[in-house]
Structure formats: C-alpha cells, structure tokens
Image (cartoon, grey):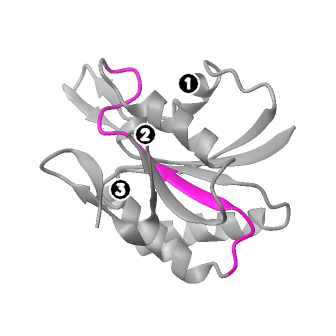
Amino acid sequence: MQDLYLLATGGTIEKVYSERTGSVTNAGSKIDRYLRLLRLPDLRVELIHLMNKDSLEMTDDDRRHILRTVEEKLIKPAPIVITHGTDTMVETGLYLEARLAALPFPIILTGAMTPLGFEASDGLQNLTESLFAARLVPAGVYVVMHNQVFPIDRVRKDRERACFVWK
C-alpha cells in the first residue's frame, strides 16, 4: 500500500454553482466525493483541506500555509498532489520549488478549467492523472493537466487556449 497526500486549496476544480446568485463560487470542498468514485486499491490517500479559494485571491500567507503543510509531511514522506486554481498554480509551484531543497518525492499541482461535476469538466481527468503521475515521476514540482506532465519551471497557462503549454 502506498501513501499519498492530497492537499485541497480550492480553485475552479472545487467551484459550485449557486442558484441564489447565478454564479460559480468556492463554497465547500467536493474532492472527497470524487475520490470515492476512483478505484485506488493500493493507494492510501490522506486528504487535507487547507483552504477553498480562487487562486486569484491566494496570498503569500496562503502559499506559506501550503509550504508549512508540505514541510510537516516531510516527517513521513510520500508524494503530494495539490489541487489549486489554474491562474496562479505555476506561481505557487515555483514558490514551493524555491523553498524545498532536495525533495524526496514529487509534488504535483493540478486543477480544472471547468468545475468537477459540470458537463465537460476536466477536473476528474486531471485529478486521476495527477494521482497516477505522483507515483511515477521523479522528485520535483510539476503541473499535471490534460494528459501532460510539466516541470514547474517549464510551463505556463495559455489563457486564450484555456490550457497549459511548454515555455
């Protein structure tokens, strides 16, 4: 049985539609519901809800909170997947990479362009691919989106095409 930490920070992947306001918001976490849909017979996932924010609202204090949580997990090292909003995902990944020397495991950041549960959502695909990639890639910080694995220093979000691309 392999262990893996899943840190949930919010972003589009976790957004829900509010009938009251007619908008999508970060109101509560739903990652655990989608994890239960996956067959993960030899993987033990520890889900840690850190926050539920749109990444455009994420602050340096939030990034420090993510970093402290990752550092706490170094006591019992295992791969880490972080669900995160796509707008500042790379910024957070670079922040972690600059402060975590000689990682013994991979850290994968992932998210979605369309929320989990919405028609044509990419969220479950990206989450599933991230769980898989975290078990295969060498130690380092990566973005996993849309069937691609990008080292954090070689990726950028292409807003016009709504995808991540090599830089």
Under circle 2, the secondary element is loop
Q: Amino acid at mark 3?
A: Ser
Q: Amino acid at mark 2?
A: Asn
The reply to whether the magenta stretch includes residue 120 is no
Q: Amino acid at mark 1?
A: Tyr
The residue that mark 2 highlights is 147
Q: Is residue 151 above or below residue 6?
A: below
The residue that mark 3 highlights is 55
Question: Mark 1 or mark 3: which is in front?
Answer: 1
Residue shown at 28% from the left, 67% from the top: 167
Majority SS type along the magenta span? loop
Q: Is residue 76 visible?
A: yes
Q: In the figure, residue 18 lies in which quadrant?
A: top left
> Marks 1 and 2: in contact by CB < 8 Å?
no
Q: In the figure, residue 13 lies in which quadrant?
A: top left
Q: Earlier in the sequence, mark 1 or mark 3?
A: 1
* Left or right of 79, for residue 53: left
Residue 52, image x, y percentages: 46, 46
Quadrant location of the N terminus? top right
Residue 84, image x, y percentages: 44, 51
Residue shown at 55% from the left, 33% from the top: 128
Question: Marks 1/3: CA distance?
Answer: 21 Å
Residue 97, image x, y percentages: 54, 75
Residue shown at 35% from the left, 31% from the top: 115
Residue 34: which numbered mark, if any? 1
